[in-house]
Amino acid sequence: MKVGDLCFFYHSGATARRVVGVVSVVKKWYAEDSDLNSEALVDVKAVGEMRRQVDLKDMKQDGELKGFIMFRQQRLSVLPVAEKVWERICELENGFEGDGFDIGKDGGDDAGV
C-alpha cells in the first residue's frame, strides 16, 4: 500500500459484513516495533461513507464480482482489489461521499456514476 492509495473500509461484524466506506493511505506500511513478528500497519484517513451499503452475501451473488479474493479469504485485513472489482462495488453502493459525483435528493445519479 502506498500513500494516496484508496481502500475500502470493510465492516466484518458477526451480523453485518459489508463495505461501509473509503479511506486513503496517509502513511505507508510500517512495523509497530522492531520485533520481526510485529504486524505491518498503515495509517489511513476517512474519505467518505458509501452512499448505499451492500451486504457481503449480496456481493457474492453478483456475477461481475465472481472470483473476488475476499470471497475466499475473508479473514485477510488487506488484499488487492482489481480496478474492475472496485468499480463494480462502487456501482452497487452508488459510490461514496467525496468521489466527485453528486447524488440527487431522490437518490438518482446526477453525474453518471
Image (spheres, rainbow, N blue to C red):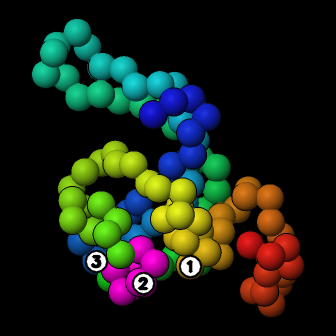
How far apart are the alpha carbons under marks 1 and 3?
20 Å
Q: Amino acid at mark 2?
A: Asp
User: Mark 2: which secondary structure?
Assistant: loop
Q: Position of residue 74 (x, y in %)?
A: 24, 61
Does 30 sit above or below residue 64? above
Residue, x 35% and y 75% (percent of image)?
66
Q: Which amino acid is tagged 3? A: Thr
To which quarter of the image does residue 97 belong?
bottom right
Q: Residue furthest left?
A: 37
Q: As drawn, is 73 to the left or to the right of 107? A: left
- Give the residue displayed 65% in from the left and 64% down from the top: 96
- Quadrant (top left, top right, bottom left, bottom right) of the N terminus: top left
Q: Nearer the viewer, residue 85 or 75?
A: 85
- 2 or 1: mark nearer the eye: 2
Task: Tell me, yes or no, whether the highlighted magenta stretch contains residue 13.
Answer: no
Which picture quadrant has residue 69?
bottom left
- Going by the numbered disc 1, the residue's amino acid type is Leu
Q: CA distance from mark 2 to mark 3?
A: 20 Å
Disc count in the image?
A: 3
Q: Which residues are magenta?
A: 58-65
Residue 65 spot, x, y in % from top left? 41, 74
Element under disc 1:
helix
Whether tag 2 and tag 1 are in contact, CB under 8 A, the answer is yes
Q: Is residue 86 above or below residue 32?
A: below
**Dot 1 corresponds to which residue?**
92
For disc 2, the marked residue is 62
Report if the CB atoms under discs 2 and 3 are less than 8 Å apart: no
Q: Which residue is mark 3?
A: 15
